[in-house]
Image: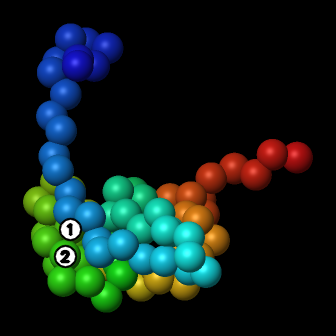
Amino acid sequence: MKDQDGTPLRVVPLPMPAPLYFDGQRLPASYANFYIANGVVLVPTFHDSRDRVALATLAELFPDRRVVGIHSVDLVWGLGTLHCMTQQEPA
């Protein structure tokens, strides 16, 4: 894959947290649901041993921004976390 200028895309793997379930349904817990804002990257965390790996990976990718973990187990019950919460809501 390449971007619009022909530069190859660089895909960086993120770990997956252990599966989370609510009422028998697997929840979409993922570190990829992070949100980039001015000066900060907000990253969902899940009290999982992989949280630190995800935070460190994103800190390397965004050296000019502070990377902040936000506990998101309760948020993911709504089937999304930080990035999903920032999206537009149609009229």
Query: Residue 85 occupies which quadrant of the picture?
Result: bottom right
Residue 51 against residue 65 in the figure, above or below = below
Q: Position of residue 29 (x, y in %)?
A: 42, 68
Neighbor class of circle 2 (other Cα within 10 Å; few <14, some 14-19, many 20+) is some
Residue extending farthest to the right is 91
Closest to the observer, 90 or 75: 75
- Residue 40 percent across, percent down from the top left: 34, 66
In the orientation shown, which residue stands out farthest toward the bottom? Answer: 47
Q: Secondary structure at mark 1?
A: helix
Task: Give above or below for 4 relative to 37.
Answer: above
- Tell whether label 1 touches label 2 (CB within 8 Å): yes
Q: Secondary structure at mark 2?
A: loop
Q: Where does residue 17 sit, x and y in percent of width and height?
A: 29, 72
> What residue sits right under mark 2 in the picture?
50
Residue lying at 56% horizontally and 58% vertically, measured from the top left: 84
- Number of numbered discs overlaid on the protein picture: 2
Image side of residue 2 versus residue 20, left or right: left
Residue in the picture at 31% in, 88% down = 47
Residue 19 appears in the rendering:
yes
Camera-nearest residue between 2 and 46: 46
Instruction: Please state which amino acid type lies under the numbered disc 1.
Output: Ala
Q: Nearer the viewer, residue 47 or 82?
A: 47
Distance between mark 2 and mark 1 Cα atoms: 6 Å
Residue 31 is left or right of residue 37, and the answer is left
**Three-letter residue code for mark 2:** Arg
Q: Which residue is mark 1?
A: 54
**Location of residue 48 (image quadrant):** bottom left
Instruction: For the N terminus, give its image quadrant.
Output: top left
Q: Quarter of the image holding residue 61?
A: bottom left
Mark number displayed over residue 13 = none
At x 81%, y 46%, the residue is 90
